[in-house]
Image (tube, coloured by chain):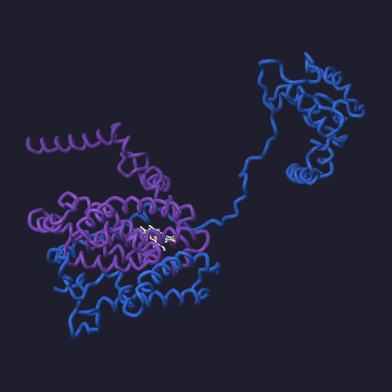
Amino acid sequence: MADEKGRGGIKEAVSGLGDHVQNSQVWNSIFRPGSPMRAENSDSPRNRSYVIMNNVLYHLHPVKVKRHGVKLSYTLCLGGLSFFLFILLTITGIFLMFYYRPTSPQAYFDLQALASDVAFGQLVRNMHRWGAHLMVITVFLHMSRVFYHGAYKPPREFNWVVGIVLLVLTLLLSFSGYLLPWDQLALWAVTVGTNMGSYAPVFGNQVTFALIGGVQITADTLLRFYVLHVLFLPFIITIFMAVHFWRVRKDGGISGPL
Amino acid sequence: MAQLPDSLLRRSAEARAKAEGRPVDEILAEMKGEAPPAPAPPAAASSQPSDAGGGRDLAAESGTYGVPVPLLERSMFARAKADGTPVPAMAGVGAPAAAASAVSSQPSAAPAPQAPSGPPPGVRTQRLLTVVKAGAIQGTEKEPQDKVNVWPHLLAIEFVALLVVLAALTLLSAFVDAPLLEFANFNEQPNPSKAPWYFLGLQELLAYFDPMVAGIIIPTFGMIALAFIPYVDRNPSVRPSDRKFAIAVFTVFFMAAAVVTIFGSFFRGPGFNFVFPWRDGIFFDDLLTILE
Ligand code: HEM
């Protein structure tokens, strides 16, 4: 008897505490009106609008979209997944940065140590690498789906051009990351890639020189690619993504229906 | 009233006629301020019957619209000046010089100001330019669309898609390790040496063309051509049946890119010579670790 009473008391106390927290000023200052986290929230068309409007998501999504736009078969989520992979690559990449030094020979041995000494180190590195390949694929497929929908037609012409810039940046991000393990695969794949660039007329050699920090790949190239890979290119691509998403909305949301 | 276009007056008269069940002409005449045939003139007019000739009772108007009498006066003078018409109260006389006396003859405008020559010092005045009916300034001609709430319909789908990709990627990463070959060695070039897979199409082209063509011209012009698609394809339709040509061209290039990439990845072995992957083995390091 006393036991049950005690438990009931605890239950009440817990739910009372929950109510207290949910009604506190702190809580309500974090979750704006309409949020499902709020105490007084109920499901209504108005609150469904508020979930978006009173949320940072409003920067990405309108309150409502055309019905065909939510059909999985329309966008196949490819643009969204490219973005998600970019986020995931940022998170896993930051993790890797804690254990990686862009110098020779440390770079290589750091990755070896990551696999053997760091909890989940190898898993995170795998996710970073396969995720990068996957992002190249989803961006290509996203571009194709936009083409086949004619979604680059007015008023979306410029967003297509922004998309091409994103495609190039995605490839550069992947390519600059390719060198970082500093193993035979990295060294020679990047050698083949940068050799192609050196055939460019006029500035070919200068561009290659600036890119790899010398006439051929050396340990200096490693630092250069590292800075491009973890700072410069992510910074640029973030700006272009912001423009890209903004234009999707300003151009009237998702295109179609066909 | 007189400044309203006739068509508008007529429309509103018709509407009122319909509502009150009276003849249109009678209401129209009433609105225009011409001798109303009906016995009961509007309330504002009845307080100042002498108004029938087109004069204005500023005191009454001031009461109705809440605009101070001096302002009404000024606007009356200004309009008369701009239109080159006589001031309403003086209809028939038409001499601007008489305007001042006309104003002072208005019963309500007690300390009748002279024909206004600007506000007294230190007084800020405002002028009512016009009254516009409520409504959008720009007409929108958008058809209503069938829309759904992003929350929950779209966000739920996105979230599921995100989870599926995350799960797939985690599973793959749990079972397949990213490659880490021997330490980078400048003196020992592996054979074959291949670029990352997304450049293998270009590397494949190197086997056919001058490096200048395969390494620079094709990728550069390929990207520029891609970027210009929206400005070259002027066909406004998005229906596949209307865009057969565009779709055919894109598909051909897409397939060509895929074919050379697959060729470069799987059908090229030592010395970048042709191999059959099922006979001679796979020379594609990215995939090698997956297969092992
Ligand atoms: C990092 C790469 C990219 C990201 C993260 C990205 C993201 C997105 C997202 C989230 C959308 C909303 C619709 C959807 O999910 O399909 C979108 C739409 C669009 N994207 Fe991308 N995109 C990328 C690359 C590209 C590329 C390479 C192109 C084309 C060359 C492109 C052209 C467009 C266009 C024209 C739209 C509007 C489509 C419509 O209204 O149906 N984007 N993008």
Of all chains in the rendering, the one displayed in purple is A
In the rendered view, would you say B101 is above or below B267?
above
Q: Residue at x 34, y 59 (%)?
A: A206
Relative to A113, residue B85 above or below = above
Which of the four quarters of the rendered structure image does ligand 1 lie in?
Answer: bottom left
Nearer to me, A129 or B223: B223
Left or right: A64 with respect to B58? left
- Please state the horizontal and vertical placement of residue A188, each as a whole percent of the image: 21, 67
Q: Is residue A134 above or below residue B240?
A: above
Residue B9: image quadrant is top right
Q: Quadrant of residue A180?
A: bottom left
- Quadrant of image for the N terminus of chain B: top right
Q: Residue furthest right?
A: B93
Q: Residue at x 7, y 57 (%)?
A: A116
Q: Look at the image and give the colour of chain B.
A: blue
The foreground one among B5 and B252 is B252
Asked whether residue B20 appears in the rendered view, the answer is yes
Please identify the residue farthest to the top as the structure is shown: B111
Q: Is residue B187 left or right of residue A62?
A: left
Residue A57, given in percent of the width and then of the height, sits at 37, 48
Among all residues in the image, which is located at the extreme bottom? B279
Residue A88 visible in rendering? no
Query: How many numbered marks have been drawn onto this rendered protein structure?
Result: 0
**Location of the C terminus of chain B (image quadrant):** bottom left
Is B233 situated above or below A55?
Answer: below
Which residue is depicted at the point 67% across and 22% down?
Answer: B125
